Image (tube, coloured by chain):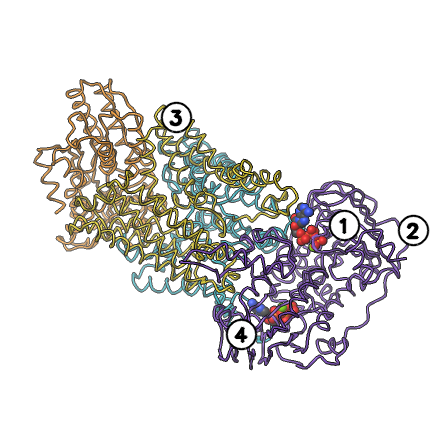
Chain colours: A purple, B orange, C yellow, D cyan
Amino acid sequence: MTLRVTGLRKSFGGVHALRGVDLTIEPGEVHALLGHNGAGKSTLIKALGGAFTPDGGTIEVAGRTYDGLSPRQSIDAGIAIIFQHLSLVESLSVVDNVFLGQEHHRLGVVDRKAQRAAAATLLERLGATCTVDDRVGDLPMGQKQLVEIAKALSRDPVVLILDEPTAALSSHEIGALERTVRALQEQGLAICYVTHLLGEVERLADRMTVLRDGAVHVSTSLLGKTRRDIIEAIAEPPTDLPPRAPVHEADPPQLLVSGLTGPGIGPIDLAVRPGEIVGLYGLIGSGRTRTLEMLFGRRPRQGVISVGGRTVGRSSPRAALAAGLALVPGDRARQGLFAPLSALDNALLPAQGTLSRFGLRRRRAERAAFEKMAAGLAVHPSTPDAPARAFSGGNQQKLLLGRWVNGILPTTVLLLDEPTQGVDVRARHEIYRVVRTIAAERRTAVLFASTDPEEIVALADRALVMQEGRLVAELSGDALDEDALLHAVHQSESDLQEYLS
Amino acid sequence: STTASKDKVAKSGKDVRTVAWDYPFTFLPVYAGVAKFAQARAKEKGLSLEQTNDNGRPDAQASNLDTLIAKKVPAIVSFPMVFEALETQAAKALSAGIIWVTYGGTLKNQSASITFSFEKGGRLLGEDAAAWAKATLGGKGKVAFLVDDTIQLGRERTAGMIDAFTKAAPDMQVVGREQAIDPDTALSKTKAILAKHPDVNVILGITDGAAFGGYKALIEAGRSETDAKTYVGGQDGDLGSLQLIKKGTFYRASAALQLRDIGNAVIDVPLAVADGKSDAEASTDVPITLVKQGDALLDDIISQYG
Amino acid sequence: MSAPASLRQLARYPLIPVIIAMAIGFELATGSFVGSQNLLGIATDSATLAIVAVPAALLVISGYLDLSVGSTYALGAVAAGWFASAHGGGLLSCVVLALLAGLAVGAINGFLCCVVGLSPFIVTLGTLTAVRGIAQQLAPLPLTGFGDGFAWLGGAKIAGLPSPVAIALLVVVVAGAILTLTPVGRHIYAIGVSREAAYLSGVRVRTVPFALFLGTGALAALAGAIKASVLGAVQSGTAGLGFELAVLTAVLVGGVSLAGGSGTLLGVVLGVAFLGILQNGLTLVGVPTFWQQVAQGLALVVAAGLAYLAPRLEALAAVRPQASRVSASAAESRPASRSAMS
Amino acid sequence: MSAPASLRQLARYPLIPVIIAMAIGFELATGSFVGSQNLLGIATDSATLAIVAVPAALLVISGYLDLSVGSTYALGAVAAGWFASAHGGGLLSCVVLALLAGLAVGAINGFLCCVVGLSPFIVTLGTLTAVRGIAQQLAPLPLTGFGDGFAWLGGAKIAGLPSPVAIALLVVVVAGAILTLTPVGRHIYAIGVSREAAYLSGVRVRTVPFALFLGTGALAALAGAIKASVLGAVQSGTAGLGFELAVLTAVLVGGVSLAGGSGTLLGVVLGVAFLGILQNGLTLVGVPTFWQQVAQGLALVVAAGLAYLAPRLEALAAVRPQASRVSASAAESRPASRSAMS
Ligand SMILES: Nc1ncnc2c1ncn2[C@@H]1O[C@H](COP(=O)(O)OP(=O)(O)OP(=O)(O)O)[C@@H](O)[C@H]1O
Ligand SMILES: Nc1ncnc2c1ncn2[C@@H]1O[C@H](COP(=O)(O)OP(=O)(O)OP(=O)(O)O)[C@@H](O)[C@H]1O
Ligand SMILES: [Mg+2]
Ligand SMILES: [Mg+2]
């Protein structure tokens, strides 16, 4: 059974998200769908899932040709999709979510027993640790992702489409997912896989189709392709990163934390020097987000935090900001972005007060600041008035970075939670460049959390490894590589020392 | 008292092609009753009747009147929610040459008025109920009032009713004084009163709607329809209540407005003003009468509902 | 496990202890609150509210809202009352007529809100106004003199219960069964939490709320007809005036979130009981009119406070038995996570 | 570029053509709609609504809601009227007293909703009920006989305009300046879009809406005082009755979303004008009472339809002039992305 898309077109207002895309996915193949942020991957997938009707083109599946599918038609045709922005219902239980819309029922009454059994089997197969009765909203991101996958598999699909399924997973869960995908491939499923992590492409995919600006750029087998080839297909190859800023051991720490303690966290002691970039590595749920949020005053905490030698008093984001601490949160949609507000508002909201005179905004100054920020971070498009929701994920992330890195606010310690989640190769590179630059030029101390060991190695001067709310290891210099990180999170301190020596 | 602008007023009934009747409590059944007769009278006289939609809101009333004045309708008959609040509008109307008839009371600025005492309606009911209580219960028993404290006409009726009753029957124990103008509210309020005082003898309502709800509560509590020791009475003269009175139930009296007379007055009074009659000559006081079983008026009013 | 579980239940429904406290207070103050007659009276009076609050709650859970119920109630009362008085209509024909009227209003609301996708607040505020006008136009004068057949609807005893109470029970049971046992029940919650997610999961995101609008309309009209039968009279201008606010209050006080996606029928039933008991008790105690209003207003604020406390209490009650479970419930210690409109 | 830009403006405010159409229709039907006296009359009558709808709109944009304005209006009217009649209070003292009363209600609402974090809907429904009771308790009888000083508030001409209109203009201008010219204006939108994201951006997520509650309370009381001065009388039981629904209707019809985060003051002013013109026109034309209600209800539905069409028209208007610009407006072709409660 083949999925064939021909000449698919879709535009939103004036934006042409898809301009006649052709895509064929054969049974038993893993087909990587690649492209820069905003290339149209999710739009294509949403069209397959029935989120909207395409403007033109056809979708052929299970021997039938459609001009547009409804979600029910899509499901009935055997298409199962793991959407980028999860389609889970947070306040319902895991089992209710897995069977939402496709409940097992007898005489109109939900057959809970059968559903629970089936869901439990699926979750076990995926290596999930949550139980069928957990409320999905209470689960950490990785488990949610697995529930979403279980939901897709519960429908016995013939085509499985995954839109950045691993963006929020740790190496452990990624491994389990990859094994599942392989097993399904062997059963003859047609699998379409969207990701920005090229390692996954290399490990899993047989073919790739690369979109650029809503059109197919290349579609080819991956046999014999190098990473360089893939990157070049997706975007202009990135320029080299600027060099690491020198860190002076003699400098007093810009951020000094001692005895930081909160529910399930700590005590944590750490120090970040001016211009230093420290990576916080750990498995999902190890407490990195909570640590950053405690530092920023978003969560109640005990312990002493000082910035530039001065102790931060109250625990609140305002107090943290006043002290020079800033956080780019990990949950972009919920905690960061003001989707309907303009790009300028998104980037400059906290700075508008500083820029204002006599309590009135100075629009010209704001525009100038925005343009400077947009140029520095290579935000595209650089229109200040477009709503943030019209930007691709990577560019939204840059707007959030720009909120604190704009030359107006006196940010001296920058906290980043998963700064490149869902960001394409090129934009990721640009974000690294921006972070490096501010560390070097403004001597900003940077503490960032990431789930991707590649990212830690690429960006950090020094890595702290977190396990169950505590720092268990520190790696820097030559000792800092992906293997060491992977070992550190999975093993105890003594094992690590052994491994390192 | 008419004003100096009297000379600008339409000089003959023929000039008045339209009467605008502004009645704020359009949700009350009385409104529809009077409207029916006013409409019929207007048709008879060959003129058109316009109405406003004030929804019981004084500011909506004021602005609708402003609109009517701006539109220069020849005659306005208005029932002010708050009398003093409409002096401005009345003066404005008069100086624009519009006939202003105050409905339900009098204003300083007006061409004429259609009056009927709200206080008197309450008083007649209170006195009758008290007399009944003396005769039947020896003046000892329990009474509950269903009242309205929110609007002026309600307060006047309430005061008339309660003052007259408690003065004439001082030994009756007052076991309830609850806000209720419609049967729905009255039913549940009376039920609550009955829970504590199942032996209430007299229930007097600010409207027949309220009294009807009280009557239903008693019936629901098992009181016989013709119980000799029970008295329910209301005000307005609603058809349902009058039928209960006629049937001989313990719904014994209603201080009835004569809807037909009022409806006719809504058309006739402005026409009389237009024909040159003075305030004193044109103004009408429509009597309010307590109707009870056997009264000739009872059948007359019932037949008015057609 | 059973003791803490019931503790959690109690924490989840803080109205239960409040209602018990109110009952004790009113009984002490008046000596006649707890008595089968008074309690049955409260139940009968509250029955019409419950009959409408239940479907309205499902609608709110699914993320919609129906403000038109006050006028639909009047329309149902007028339809049934008119047929019963003018045409000597029997029970069945009157009820069917009322239901048809309610379904018509529900269909209009449902079409505009679910199919076209207009704002439920404005649309149903519009139908609230318009339908009242129609009801008054149809029956400007009070309707009375219904036949015995129609009187049965509000006056009969079914299994020893007054018929309005029996009907309300039936509505609660049926709606409860739909909500908890059937796939549609899950869909109602899912649509309320995330219409988009539900849509992509193949849930009928138009049909389900449309049906709930139909049900709310039909039951609002039925409630009007029942009240007409109980009273033996209908005043189109005052029947159900302000009922929409009473319904919404009961639903929200009962713990259903206006943002959709959460709430239980037990909560709604408790909300109805809370309002009924409050009104009855204040009258029993003989609180003067204006202070009754003040007390009712304060009670709403207290109820809002309870709705706020509930998840916190629940979280507290949950801490002991399973301290280490991941349970990031609503008991976040920081204010920023609260949605203002919930 | 100017023609399509103004086309887009028009598409954004579909009430503008509708209001023009209504004006033409009413003028043709009556011959007396367009006339300085009638138009000034509409403006004066609508002024009090505008004075409250404007701060209420800011509150809704920030994701909150104040239903208590109807009673705060009555309380303000009673406070000012009482001081003017019983104590011969002058203009200033009466206004200050009314403002203090309004600030008190606003502070209670703000404290409960913003600081404690209770549901604004239930809390302000509670204060709506309670404050009405208090106003009636304070002044059970109508207040009249105000001095000339107080009459100035509603009767004076300021720069040739009736003082209520001048005050309303001032309110619109000040609120418009806050919303568009100051950083706080952006904060209001930001809080409405995402309270959490605003909190993490250092916005005062409690103080800003609290201040808006204060402003709404104060201006609702001021509106009551103005109307008391215009009418020369206050009746606590009916002053501002149903005003809260009129305010909310104007705000929503004006295109502000109940979900928060979107809307403009121009839209709200148009919403107020729409309602004022509708009421005036229906009375002018002489539509029978009950049909007026029906028409008003239908007008709301039409307004909901316009709010629905606006983004779609805007998107259409946007397509031609700048086909490739990024402009992800709300013009989704599927219903699933719409929030039902907006
Ligand atoms: N609902 C929408 N309204 C307007 N524009 C949209 C909408 N959804 C997507 N777009 C636009 O369509 C284009 C394609 O977006 P899409 O989400 O498909 O990109 P993507 O390839 O999935 O990117 P990413 O890797 O960041 O997820 C983008 O320019 C985006 O801004
Ligand atoms: N052991 C725990 N105790 C209390 N709460 C926890 C615990 N583990 C997770 N949580 C809650 O679950 C939520 C989601 O966890 P999530 O894994 O996303 O973040 P985290 O624990 O900070 O880990 P990380 O960012 O390292 O992945 C947290 O915000 C926290 O409230
Ligand atoms: Mg995507
Ligand atoms: Mg995290």
Mark 3 lies on a secondary structure that is helix
Q: Which is more N-terminal, label 1 or label 2?
A: 2
Q: Nearer the viewer, mark 3 or mark 2?
A: 3
Query: Which chain contains the residue that carries disc 2?
Result: A
- Which label number is shown at residue A250? 2
Mark 4 lies on a secondary structure that is helix
User: Do pointers 3 and 2 mark residues of a single chain?
Assistant: no
Q: Amino acid at mark 2?
A: Ala
Classed neighbour count for the residue bearing mark 4: other residues with Cα under 10 Å, few (<14), some (14–19), many (≥20): some
Q: Residue reaching furthest right?
A: A250
Report if residue D272 is visible in the image: no
Q: Position of residue D184 (x, y in %)?
A: 62, 51
Classed neighbour count for the residue bearing mark 2: other residues with Cα under 10 Å, few (<14), some (14–19), many (≥20): few
Q: Which residue is mark 1?
A: A324
Q: Amino acid at mark 1?
A: Gly
- Which label number is shown at residue C27? 3
> Distance from label 1 to label 4 (Cα)?
43 Å
Q: Amino acid at mark 4?
A: Val
Mark 2 lies on a secondary structure that is loop
Query: Which chain contains the residue that carries disc 3?
Result: C
Query: Which chain contains the residue that carries disc 1?
Result: A
Q: Which residue is mark 4?
A: D319
Q: Position of residue D254 (x, y in %)?
A: 46, 57
